[in-house]
Image: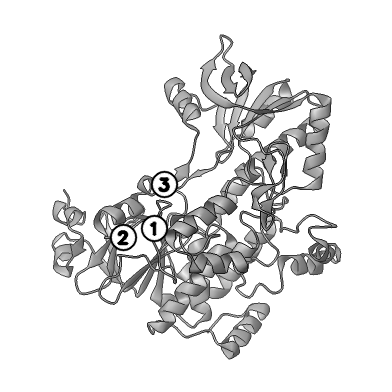
Amino acid sequence: MSRGDLTPELLDSPLWADELVQRAGIPVFDVPLVSVGGGIGSFTLVDALRIRGVPTTSIRVLSTSDSPWQTWEYLTRVSQLPAHERIRSDSGARPDNLWGFPSYALQEAWQERTLKPVYQVLAEPVLADFYSPRSGMVTRSLRREADRIGYWETLAKGQVRMVRKRAGGGYFTVLTPPAGTGPTKRVVIRSQYVHLAVGYPGLKFLDDLQDFRQAHGERYRVVNAYEPHEHVYERLRSRPGVVVVRGAGIVASRVLQRLIDDRQRHGLQTQIVHLFRTWVSGSHGPNPWMRRKGGDGWAYQAFTMPKSAFGGQLKARFRKADAERRARLAKTVAGTTTPKLRRWQEQLRQGRQGGWYHPVQAVVDRIDRAPDGRLVTLTRSDGAAPMQYVSDFIIDCTGLEADMDEHRVLDDLVRHGGVLTNRAGRLLTGKNFEVIGADSDGGALYASGAATAGNHFLAVDSFLGMQTAALDIADDLAGRGFCARLGPIRSVAQWAKWAANRRPS
């Protein structure tokens, strides 16, 4: 093993002394706070801390991404939400603006000189669909705020290998910089505080699709909606074809809309088979106060969670509940949902009447390959004979992988960092998103995003959820003396600087 790399002694030790790292020849850099991830979760914390007066020299964001929105923008684009399409987010959920004012709707109204977005917010959801911003507006706003707060000064490129506790307090975060950019393979950042916002480790495939892909080396006909699959739409424009869509969430609805838009725009003959594992026939829920709309197989909800989970009664109930009660509540209010939008609903109605959109409730037994190279999906369902569907493509819209053992840093923390997991199998956190079991003699390790699901806050994997976590973490850091508190005077002054696009101080 070359000098400047991890030694067996380091790999096996849960607690590192400074001398141990020095003997390995790994350069050590001191920064008070490190954020691992570099996505929107890291960005919201940096934004909150900069507004509270923390200089950029006291923060390092460790990431393989060039910008906080890079992964998010990629995932929205390949899942059929390019810059001109509207995402599934509330008007006031602005990761670039912790005050939420002006909202995206007000900004759009001002920029486009129209009151339509304002009316939509006032009339939603009875007289109009819920307002949501275009994805391009979100990225432009994030870029403006990143420039304003000096985010780029905090960014250090590289792959984080692990986070280990330091003897004497704090943490060592091991970073592998891009090849050829340093004298050694690894560098270590020594800090008092660490924040984890690592997102999802990868794509999540249904088991039968994963088995088929691995057995046949298939990457062309069987695709995930979160990976590049523009070739599917290009192929269908050149000749008639059949597509099997699996999933019942927002991504499935967006893929269906793209298929139908292309069919209508180009006069195509595309046939769509939509497989639902669970069929929702109407409104559902345990009681009249906890019900969501549904129909035609879908469960309808404007956002990923009920609005009260972000800042109302449901949020308060989660904070007060014990672990068992939280698990029951999460099972009731979470699940796969999609917004019920008028245009999209009309498209599906036309497809059912026209006989080219076929929604089916079924369980897939396996995928086979037909003699001509096409795909055969073999299914079964209660009260019906087994069926098979021959298609040119299968699009898996079931989501992203969130298991902790699939992420190298999280798995290492479970094995060597003393962290605990909750009933959802994610990091167990306290009320300020501090990771339980990871404290280190005055140092604290925090987490936000998907890795913290199942704790006291339900909507962690959302713009407002990441912003809520950032504010709670910043409050805890203020109590530790790391930054100033955000009182009324500072808040008003900093909002004025935000509005004027002036650097915070």
- For label 3, the residue is 403
Which residue shows up at 17% across the image and 61% down it?
A: 25
Q: Are marks 2 and 1 in contact (CB under 8 Å)?
A: yes
Give the alpha-carbon distance from disc 1 to disc 3, as whole Å.
Answer: 11 Å
Whether residue 104 is visible to the viewer of this picture, yes or no, is yes
Image x and y of residue 261, in percent: 77, 36
Amino acid on which the number 2 mark rests in the picture = Val
Image x and y of residue 370, in percent: 56, 12
Query: Disc 2 or 3, which lies upstream in sequence?
Result: 3
The image's mark for residue 419 is 2
Amino acid on which the number 1 mark rests in the picture = Leu
SS at circle 1: loop
Whether 410 is drawn above or below 294: the answer is below
- For label 1, the residue is 427
Of residue 480 and residue 288, the one placed in the foreground of this image is 288
Give the alpha-carbon distance from disc 2 to disc 1, as whole Å.
Answer: 7 Å
Task: Find the residue positioned furthest to the front.
Answer: 287
Query: Disc 1 or 3, which lies upstream in sequence?
Result: 3
Amino acid on which the number 3 mark rests in the picture = Asp
